[in-house]
Image: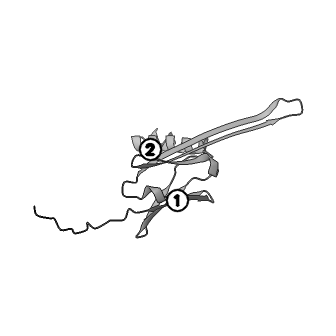
Amino acid sequence: MYGLTPFGRNDYDLFNMFDDFDRDFFPHHPVNNCRTDIKDEGDKYVMESELPGFEKEDITLDINGSYLVISAEHKTNDEKKDEKGKYIRRERTFGSYRRSFDVSGIDTDNISAEYKNGVLIVDMPKKKHEEPQPKRLEIK
């Protein structure tokens, strides 16, 4: 009797079934998962975030205290009507993304960013570590 079911009898398989349903039912979801890589290039960090399907105008970068916040929002409205003005298809999608990164060791005044080919590239120069200058104290 168990051989007739299309999935196994444990919780792991049940969750996989729902994951497969989500991927099959929403295959073109614009904000599935934003993969972010951060490279240490000595004097700076370079962060690359994949944001496919967004326009440059859809993306904002904010510094809030010691955090860099990346936000992206995407809306589409695709309407197709026949010659009588009746809908033959009407689709709308909305996706948003928000992620924060600690930039306490970053020179936030000199952060620069560019967006090309669906990838947001953020150059984050490190704060320069200044050695304390020796000084002589006067004795009174």
Q: Is residue 108 above or below residue 75?
A: below
Viewer-closest of 101 and 133: 133
Q: Where in the figure is residue 71, as x and y percent of width and height? A: 53, 45
Q: What label sits on residue 54 in the rendered view? A: none
Q: Secondary structure at mark 1?
A: strand
In the image, taking residue 119 as reference, residue 36 lies left or right, namely left
Give the labeled residue for mark 1. Answer: 112
Q: Secondary structure at mark 2?
A: helix
Q: CA distance from mark 2 to mark 1?
A: 45 Å
Viewer-closest of 98 and 63: 63
Residue at 86%, 34% in the rendered image: 82
Viewer-closest of 50 and 72: 72
Q: Residues within 10 Å of mark 2 (few under 14, many from 20)?
A: few
Q: Where in the figure is residue 83, as x and y percent of width and height? A: 89, 33
Q: What label sits on residue 13 in the rendered view? A: 2
Which residue lies most toward the right here? 83
Residue at 61%, 56% in the rendered image: 118
Residue at 49%, 58% in the rendered image: 111
Res 136 visible: yes
Q: Residues within 10 Å of mark 1 (few under 14, many from 20)?
A: few
Q: Which quarter of the rendering shows the C terminus?
A: bottom left
* Color style of the picture: one colour
Res 10 visible: no
Residue type at numbered disc 2: Asp
Residue type at numbered disc 1: Ser
Quarter holding residue 94: top right
Image depth: mark 2 or mark 1 in front: 1
Q: Is residue 94 above or below residue 51?
A: above
Q: Earlier in the sequence, mark 2 or mark 1?
A: 2
Q: Where in the figure is residue 126, as x and y percent of width and height? A: 40, 63
